[in-house]
Amino acid sequence: MAPDPQDDATVTDESTAVDDGAPAEATEDAVDSASAPNPVHEEMAALLQAGGLGGDSVARSESVFDDYVVRVANRAWRHAGEIARDALECDYLSFIAGIDWAPAPKEGGEEASGDTSQPAQPTEMTFGAAGSAGRFQVFAHVQSTRRHWGLTLKTDLDESAPTVESWVPLYPGADWHERECWEMFGFVFEGHPSLRHLYLPADFEGHPLRKDFPLLARVVKPWPGLVDVEAMPGEPEAAADTETAQA
Amino acid sequence: MSTERMVATDQLAPEALHHLADAQINVELDTGDMILNLGPQHPATHGTLRLVVRLDGERVVSADPVIGYMHRGYEKLTEFRTYPQVTTLINRIDWLSSFANEVPFMDAAEKLMDIEAPPRAKYIRTILTELSRIATFLLFLGEMGLQVGALTPAFYGFRDREHVLNLIEAVTGGRFHPNFNRIGGLKDDLPWGWVAECRSVMDIVFEACDTFEKLVAGNEIFEARTRGIGIIPADVGSSYGMSGANLRASGVDWDLRRDGPPYLVYPELDFEVHTHPDADSFARYIVRLEETRESARMVLQCLDALPSGPVMAKVPRIIKVPEGEVWVETENPLGQMGYYVISKGATGPFRVKIRSASFSNVSILPWLLRGVFVPDVITILGSLYFILGDIDR
Amino acid sequence: MELLALDIGWGTTLAIKTIVVLIIIPTGALILGYVFLLKMMSHMQSRLGPMDPGGFHGWYQLVGDGLKFIQKEDVMPAQADRRVFAMAPAVVVLSTFLIFAVIPMGPDLVVKDLDVGVFYALAVSSLSVIGVLMAGWASANKFALLGALRAAAQLIAYELPLLLAVVGVVVQAGTLNLQGIVTAQQDGSIFGFSGLGEPFILTQFIGFALFLVAAQAELTQTPFDMPVAESELVSGFMVEYTGFRFLFFFIGEFGTAFAFAALAATLFLGGWAIPGVEGDWANILGPFVLFAKLMAVAFLMFWVRFTYPRLREDQLQSLAWKVLIPLGLLNLVLTGVFKVAF
C-alpha cells in the first residue's frame, strides 16, 4: 500500500481529504464507493480478475481508507485465498476472524434506566464495507511483503449452519486463527486438521463473541457505575453523578 | 522395556547364545516418549504459556502450545466500552511497550472521525512509541542472556531500561500503562526540561547497546547456543504471519514504518531497516540490537524537529465515531499490530478485531520445535520474544 | 602427637580433627557463599546485595538463611522414594567432608596424611554423582530426572580432565601425598632462585587451567550448569528439595567449591606454604595462607560463573572429550618429558 502521487488520500498532511474524495459523514454508509479510484486497488482488482476470481464469485469490492475490501461468495473462499497468494503475491497472512452483524440485545435502552454501562448501539442490523448477505461473516487480511500491499477478503456464512472452507492448506498460520474463530463464533472450517479450543477450556459451552452471548462479568455483577449513589460526606442526599459524558 | 519381547534364556536359539551377554539389552529397547509440561508456571516461558512437549531423551518429538491462561476477552470487552475507555484496555495487551498499543487504535478512531492530531502531538507520539520500543528491546537484550544461562546481562537490561521508563513516567505519569493517548492528540504536553533529559538518556541507550554487543553477542558460548538454532525460512515465517524483527531476521525487508501506509511522522524520519540473512536466534538478537540503536536515532531526530503548538485537536466532548470500517496496522516492538475497527456511529465500537503480533509469532512453534533439544526450546522461546498479553488478549 | 609443644593423645586428636572438619566445611561454604554469591555477584550486576542483616553489609544473611532452612517443614512429594530421597543430600555432603580429610593446612595440620592423598581426594569427590542421581530419580519429577541424567553424564565426563590436570602435578612433585606436594613446591626453585619456592602454577599452567575448567564442571556451575539450569529446570535435580535437605545441597555445593579451591591452592599455588616461614609459625599462619589462596582461586571460579551463559549438554560433552582430554594428555606428556630431561 505505497502512497502514490495520484492518490490524494494520503493521510500525512490533509486533515480533511482523507478518503477518496467523497464527503463521508452524512450518509449512513460512510464507506464510499470509489469515486476517485485508487490505482493500487485497481491493479489488485485487475490481477484478481486475471487470476480467475471474477464474475459471480465476487459480490462487491470497495476501497476503505487504504485498504481494499473484496467480498466473495462462500464457495469461492479458498479459491480467493489461493489467487491472493499466487496472483497478488500475498505471502503474509495477517489474520482470519469473524463478524457477527446482529445488534446486541439490550433490555431497556439507554434512556429507560439511565444505564450507561455500555454504549448504545443501533438496534437495526446494518452492514459495513462491501456489505453482507446475513448475520455472519468471515474476513481475512493478507499482505505481500514484496509488493507492499494488502487485501481484505470477506465472505458470508449461512446463519443456521455457518461453514466455510479452511485456509490451512494455503497458509499454515491459518490453523490458530481458524481455531479461534470457531471457538468464538461457532464457524466450522472444513478441512481444518483439528478444530479444537484455543483460548477457552475444552469443555466450554457457547460461542462468546456472538452478540447473543452476554458479557458474563456484567451478568454476574452489575456495572459499578450504575449503583454509585453513595452520598458525599456532609451532603444529605446527593445522588452521585454516574458518568454521562465520557471524554 | 516391554516384557513380551524378552525371551527366556533356555528358549533362545543356539546362535543367539553366542551373544548372550548382549541379548537382553539389545532386544529392541522400547523407550517411550516422555511428555513434559513446560509451564504454565515456568521461568522461561515469559508468562503463562504452556508447552506440552513430547520428548525422546532430550529431543522434542512434537510440541503443542496451550495458550489462553491469560485470555481476558478483549474483543468482547471493547464492545462494551466507549472509545476513550478502550484505551485503558488495549494498553494492557503488550504491557512492556504499552504506549505503542494505543497508537493504531487512536489512528483508526481519528481516521473514522476525520480528525487529525496536531503535528506536535504526532511527534510526541512518535517519540513515546520509539521510547517504548527501546524499553522493550533493552529488556529483551538482557533477558536473552538469561535464557541461555548468563545471569548478569538481565540486570544490566533492567538497569538501563529504568532510565527510559523514568522518561515515560515524567511525561505520562505511568511507567507501564501510560494511557496517555486521546482521540485527537495527547492528554498533556511535555514537562519542562524533558527534551534535554531525553537526549542524555539516548546516550545511555547507545552505551548500553554497545555493552550488550560486546558482552552478550560477542560471547562465544552465547553464539554457540544461538547460532543455527530455530531457523525460520522467510516464506514459512510469513505464511504463519510472523512479523517484526523475527521476520526481518529471516531476510525479509519489510517494515511498516517505511513500507506500510504512512502513520505518525515516520515518513519524515530518516532511518534504516535492518535485516539479517541467517534466520536463527542469533540473527533475531542482532536485528533487535540494531533496531534499538535505530530507535534512539529516531528519537533524537524527532527531538530536533519537534514543532511547537497544541497537543490536542478540537474534539467534541462526547466522542461519537461515525459509521465505518477501518484497518490500521503499525510496526510495534513485538511485530505488526493492527486493529480492524467497525463502527456504527455510537460512542463505542461495534466490533474491534485486535491483530496481535505474538499470536502469530507463537503459532509457528509446533512447526519450529520439532527435533530440537530441550535447551534450544528455551533459546527459541526467548528469541521469538512474545508477551503473553499479546498472545492471549 | 606434638603440637605447639603439647602432648595430646590420639583420641583427643581424632575428636579435634573431626570437629575441625565439621566446622570448617559449613563455615567455608558460608564465607564463600556470602562473599562471592551474594556480594561479588551483586556488585557485578550493579546492585548491592544484602545490606541489612547483621548491620555491616548484611554479613549475617547466610547464617539467617541457614537457620530459616532448618526450621522449615519437611515436604516430600507423595510419589517420592522416601529413603532414597532422604539419603541423597547426605551422600552429596559426605563426599565434601571426606575431601577435606586430606588437605593440609600446616606442616602438622592435616586430618590424615595419606600417602595416596591425591588419589583419595579425587575418588571421594566422585561420590557426589551418586547423590545427584539418587536425588533426581527419587524426586518423582520429570524435571528433576532430566537434571539428574544431565548431571551424571557431565560429572563423569569431567572427571577425566580433572584427573589429567592433577597427574601432571603429581609427576612433577614425584608423590601423591598432598603434604609432600606442598613441600616440593616450598623447596623448589625457579631457575635457581629458591626464595619463593616453586608454585606449580608456573610450570603446570595448562594443568591449572584444566583443573579450573573441570572443577567448574564438577561443581555444576555455569558455564556447565545444565543439571541445574535455572531458566529451564529451575534447580534441576534439587527442585523437590526444601528446608533442611536443601540446606544440605547448598552446603554441599559451596562446600565442594571450598574444597576444590583448597585443592587447587594446594596443588598449584603452594598450599599453606609462605616463603620464609617455617616450623611452628607455619602451623599458625598456614590456615590463613591457605585460606587467602583458595579465596583467590574461588574468585576466578565464581567470576566465570556469573559471566558466561551455559553450554548445552552436547556442546559440554564435546568440549570435555574433544578438547580438554587431549589437552590434558598433552600436558602429561610435556610434563613427563621435562621432568626427565631437566
Image: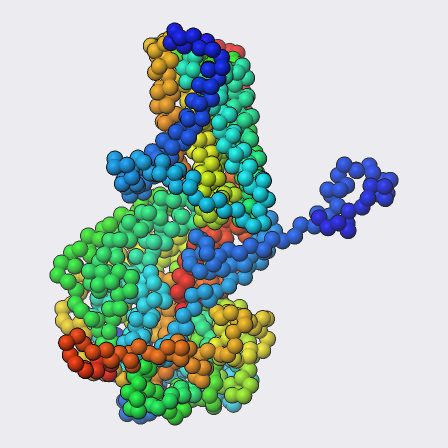
Residue drawn at point x = 46 percent, y = 15 percent:
C12
Image location of residue B280, percent across then percent down: 46, 53
Residue drawn at point x = 40 percent, y = 8 percent:
C6
Please state which of residues B151 and C335 is positioned toward the viewer in this rendering.
Answer: B151
Q: Is residue B141 visible?
A: yes
Corner quadrant of residue C63:
top left
Image location of residue C310, percent across then percent down: 45, 42
Report the coloring of the rendering: rainbow
Please state which of residues A216 and B304 is positioned toward the viewer in this rendering.
Answer: A216
Where does the C terminus of chain B fall, quadrant-wise? bottom left
Instruction: Say if B218 sits above or below A26 in the image.
Output: above
Image location of residue C332, percent across then percent down: 53, 21
In the drawing, does residue C107 fall left or right of residue A224?
Answer: right
Instruction: Say if C168 sits above or below A236 in the image.
Output: above
Instruction: Say if C257 sits above or below C272 in the image.
Output: below
Q: Is residue B252 visible?
A: no
Instruction: Say if B319 sits above or below C58 in the image.
Output: below
- The total number of labels drawn is 0
Residue drawn at point x = 27 percent, y = 76 percent:
B84
Image location of residue C109, percent across then percent down: 43, 15
